[in-house]
Image (tube, rainbow, N blue to C red):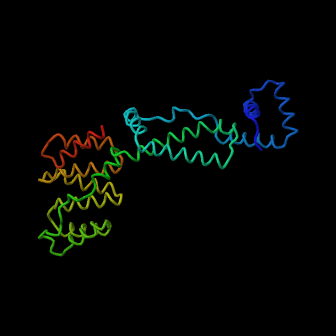
Amino acid sequence: MSFSEEIYIKIEQYLANEMTEKDRLSFEKEIANDAILAEEIEINKQLQQDFGETPSWVSLQVDKDETKELESFFESDEAAILQQVMLEAQEAYKDEKEVPVFSLRKIAPYAIAASIALFIGVFSLTRKDTAEGLYANYSGWKELPSLTSRAVDENKLLTQGEVYFLDKQYVEALKKFESYTTLEKNYVPVVSLYKGISYMEIGAYPKAMKEFDTLINSKLLDSSKGYWYKTLLLLKQGNKKKAIQVLHIITSNSDNYNYFEAQKILKELQ
């Protein structure tokens, strides 16, 4: 049964203890004589208990640096499409079900808050300058030199490891690379890179960091590559602050590996 808006206003006032003594007694007589009204009050009372007070808008905080980008997103075609989908869903729901005025008034702030959170969430997922987004953009590994041509790989451990690596079987690849480094007395930078990336891809971040730091500290010709892959590791971890610190090191010398790419990422992160 649907009640008038006047009744829902009375329900709201009654549950909020905002009625005068006279009005309260009069309304309680109505409740006593109307089982459906009494049930409606219980339902709305439960709604209040479930939702609590109107949500504080300050809890929906957006970083100041993202404000302009959010405004641009809301004006974009993607936002327009999402808004249309939500409106169509809303109309479909209204066609199927009649929602009491009181319930709408109480739930509306939460629905609005959820909608804003959804917009912000979609916006964040579509952004390419988030730490994780940048990692995804720059972690193709196509720039890695092949291991198959190394003359020292007499037992084919590196060749086998690279096959596993390209097939994204990183655990199996690491078995081959670790076996190789156990046998090989000399430090081979490119193998360290493959090991570091493999550890990074399986989530063994401390081991990955150790490999990249070892390369950095080797002071060999390829040592600056360690900074680049260390940056990608930090981005994958979502550690934007430390990633920026390492990017500053890369961009301090134009001879460093991926100098220009580092500049691009730094610009997007700051």
Between 3 and 232, the residue placed more toward the observer is: 3
Q: Is residue 247 above or below residue 204?
A: above
**To which quarter of the image does residue 28 belong?**
top right
Residue 183 x, y percent position in the rendering: 19, 70
- Quadrant showing the N terminus: top right
Between 133 and 165, the residue placed more toward the observer is: 133
* Residue sitting at x 23%, y 53%: 212
* Residue sitting at x 17%, y 59%: 189
Residue 207 x, y percent position in the rendering: 30, 57
* Residue sitting at x 70%, y 40%: 100
**To which quarter of the image does residue 151 belong?**
bottom left
* Residue sitting at x 61%, y 34%: 54
Residue 143 x, y percent position in the rendering: 20, 57
Q: Is residue 19 left or right of residue 58?
A: right
Residue 169 x, y percent position in the rendering: 32, 67
Q: Is residue 75 left or right of residue 47?
A: left
- Quadrant showing the C terminus: top left
Q: How many numbered circles are shown? A: 0
Q: Is residue 151 above or below residue 54?
A: below
Residue pushed farthest bottom? 155
Between 223 and 58, the residue placed more toward the observer is: 58
Between 71 and 153, the residue placed more toward the observer is: 71
Q: Is residue 84 above or below residue 174?
A: above
